[in-house]
Amino acid sequence: MTEAGGNVSNSLFCYEIHARDRRCSARTGTFVTTHGAVQTPAFMPVGTAATVKGLEVEQLHATGTQIVLANTYHLALRPGEGVVKSLGGLHRFMGWNGPILTDSGGFQLFSLAQMTKVDEQGAVFRSHIDGTLLHLSPEEAVRIQESLGSDIAMVLDHVVGLPNGNDVIRDAMERSIRWARRCRQAHTRGDQAQFAIVQGGLDSQMRAECAERLAELDFPGYAIGGLSVGESPHEMYRAIEDTVPSMPDGKPRYLMGVGRPVNLLEGIRRGVDIFDCVMPTRNGRNALAFTDEGTLRLRNLKHRLDDRPLDENCPCAACRRSRGYLRHLFIAGEMLGPILLSVHNITYYQRLMAEARSAIERKRFDEFSARKQAGWAAASNDGSESDS
């Protein structure tokens, strides 16, 4: 039985599944939003403060990016959601005409735990910028995201680190469900979809229970939260396996904040549709490039006289230059280096997603994934630079 919630119809948003690879749980689909459709599996670059660091939107479009992520907490602090709203909303503000997802600020309950107090009403943050207090309740998280005008708004959830005690994880899970219900009731924008977030740590029963109880609230989409916060990859994959079967099959599934290339493929194999992570841009700013042959550390001396591109098959601007030139940019402290490596890494991630969609449609995802992972592993085993 579906529990009624909020004042908003979900009719503007739909998710259509196109293909499944029956040998695993991988699938392709289309999620329709107010600002366009997203082909899944999809990767969202992180634009925390209404910008993917260092990249203009035309560069971002050229990477094949369909949807970007921005952050409620950071935008509420600077410039303030009222400023964004007065300047035409988030899309006009940042010049991006495609879909945008905003995180609710729930992750900051974990990452800024030393400056945060959580109770049933919500969270009180002390700004990392100037120390002022920010009160973030479920209702306030909804209000801020509605002012920002994103296409997808995440409910406020309670994230705790791992490992942790069962009582702590149970308390956070139960609170996340109560907060999701409050977010559902506070939601008023018909052009904005709300996604719920499944918590439960590494406990399989709690994960399944949380997903089932949230499914009763009939959100347009569901996320797997509370991972990549201290657990091993094996534990993370097991938590995904414990969660996905209890999530609605006809709604998009979003794995929050997880983003090594191998993690993406393993998530897709287990039925995940959407991902986000700072890894391609953060590593790009630090001279690390992702390739099918593992990662390349461009500051290394061995690239000084290398006239090869990062990837001969990559169409990005960075791959029109040599590895030697890219290394020079970083050694010389030129800002073009981080820009080009960020472009390349996002392009690599988007190509990986496009190739994954094609493999699923051909019912060959496992073979595709094994081939990619074998290339990354070979690079690591022969003493090269890979850490992916």
Image (spheres, rainbow, N blue to C red):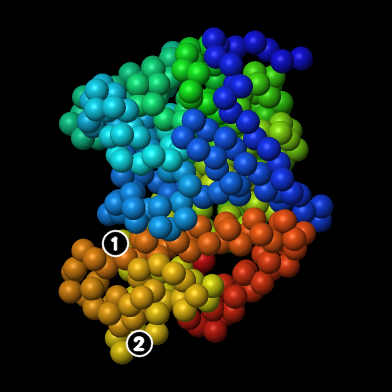
- Residue 159 horizontal/vertical position (percent): 49, 32
Q: Which residue is mark 1?
A: 339
Residue drawn 60% across the image and 47% down it: 40
Residue 119 at least partly seen: no
Q: Mark 2, residues whose alpha carbon is within 10 Å: few (<14), some, or many (≥20)? A: few
- The amino acid pointed to by label 2 is Asp
Residue drawn 46% across the image and 35% down it: 35
What distance separates the C-alpha of mark 2 from that of mark 1?
20 Å
Residue 195 at least partly seen: yes
Mark sitting on residue 307: 2
Residue drawn 59% across the image and 37% down it: 31
Residue 226's place in the image compared with 19, above or below, is: above
- Residue 141 horizontal/vertical position (percent): 41, 21
Residue 18's place in the image compared with 292, above or below, is: above
- The amino acid pointed to by label 1 is Ile
- Residue 181 horizontal/vertical position (percent): 57, 15
| Lateral position of residue 253 relative to residue 111, left or right | right
- Residue 52 horizontal/vertical position (percent): 34, 48
- Quadrant in the rendering for residue 362: bottom right
- Quadrant in the rendering for residue 353: bottom right
Front residue of this view, candidates 335 and 136: 335
Q: Mark 1, residues whose alpha carbon is within 10 Å: few (<14), some, or many (≥20)? A: many
Mark sitting on residue 350: none
Quarter of the N terminus within the rendering: top right
Tell me the SS state at disc 2.
Answer: loop
Tell me the SS state at disc 1.
Answer: helix
